[in-house]
Amino acid sequence: MQIVIIGSGNVAYHMAKAFTLRGISLAQIFGRNEKELNKISEELHIPYSAEQLEDADLYIICVSDNSVEEVSKIIRKKDCLVAHTSGSLPKEILIGDYRKSSFYPLQTFSKSKELEYEKIPFFIEAESEEDKKTLFEVASKISENVMESNHEKRKYIHLTAVFACNFVNHLFSRAKEISDSQTIPFEYFLPLIDETVKKIYEIEPKMAQTGPAVRNDKRVLQLHERLLQGESLEIYKTMNHSIQKMYEL
């Protein structure tokens, strides 16, 4: 099977690397950013182009959600399978006379961070059973966790991921702002963060909740509010309100 990856960002890089590490040769990686494409090509030994799109049996579009529809129009081949990697878009966003599908890896991607690809869940969707089988076989070469999911379910998967990853990381950033303001090394908080994450492997998150809000410790809550201002104060109040509402305090 001839496979082409379209994109040059974090997802494209990791998809290309995952395939390469599993011994799956790619016909090409294609995109607009020739500098980034060249870096990926040199590291992974994959042909690249910013001008001419190769013919392929499977095109995997790894670009931002805002660009998927426009990028999909450049694929002119009719007898091929095209998949996007978005968690929030339907396969129908793809514009072209080809077979449409989705190939969603549930993970956060940064080029500088190594990943264990076999642990990444992949959610696939296609128009026919034959194409589902093809995507399942391709994804299974990378991951031990491959599941079928329609767009309606995938929207909730992506929404859950935003809460579990993007929002949590934003709180890490806010926490670092506070520690930096008092010249406290953020590294001191890493064991606490590690333990917080480890706990939810064994305990349901709701059961693992600790802190002044769940204890309804008004003295500490008021003290913290006096130390904060602006957006951090609003976040603190909102989070505590949500915790207390969950536990009906």
Image: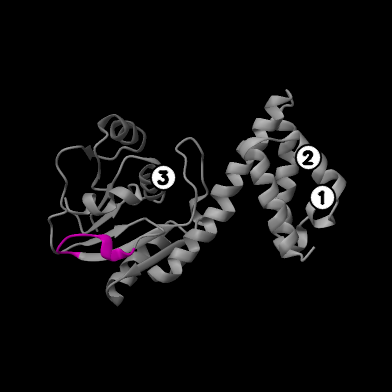
Decide if residue 88 is in sight here.
yes
The answer to which of marks 2 and 3 sits earlier in the sequence is 3
Task: Report the colour scheme.
Answer: one colour
Amino acid type of the residue tagged 3 in the rendering: His
The answer to which of 224 and 99 lies nearer the viewer is 224
Q: Position of residue 188 (x, y in %)?
A: 75, 32
Chain part drawn in magenta: 90-98
Decide if residue 211 is in sight here.
no
Real-space CA distance between mark 2 and mark 1, rounded to the nearest whole angstrom: 10 Å
Q: Position of residue 244 (x, y in %)?
A: 75, 59
Q: Mark 1, mark 3: which one is toward the viewer?
A: 1
Q: Quadrant of the N terminus?
A: bottom left
Check contact, mark 2 vs mark 1: CB within 8 A: yes
Instruction: Tell me the SS state at disc 3.
Output: helix
Q: Residue at x 24, y 37 (%)?
A: 32
Amino acid type of the residue tagged 1 in the rendering: Pro
Q: Quadrant of the C terminus?
A: bottom right
Amino acid type of the residue tagged 2 in the rendering: His
Q: Residue at x 84, y 55 (%)?
A: 216
Q: Position of residue 79 (x, y in %)?
A: 14, 64
Instruction: Tell me the SS state at disc 1.
Output: helix
Q: Position of residue 200 (x, y in %)?
A: 70, 58
- Residue holding disc 1: 212
The answer to which of marks 2 and 1 sits earlier in the sequence is 1
- Residue holding disc 3: 14
Q: Residue at x 35, y 38 (%)?
A: 44
Q: Residue at x 44, y 37 (%)?
A: 111
Real-space CA distance between mark 1 and mark 3, rounded to the nearest whole angstrom: 40 Å
Residue 224 tag number = 2
Asked if residue 214 lies in the magenta stretch, the reply is no
Q: Assess disc 2: are there few (<14), some (14-19) or many (≥20) residues with their C-alpha within 10 Å of its C-alpha.
A: some
Q: Assess disc 1: are there few (<14), some (14-19) or many (≥20) residues with their C-alpha within 10 Å of its C-alpha.
A: some
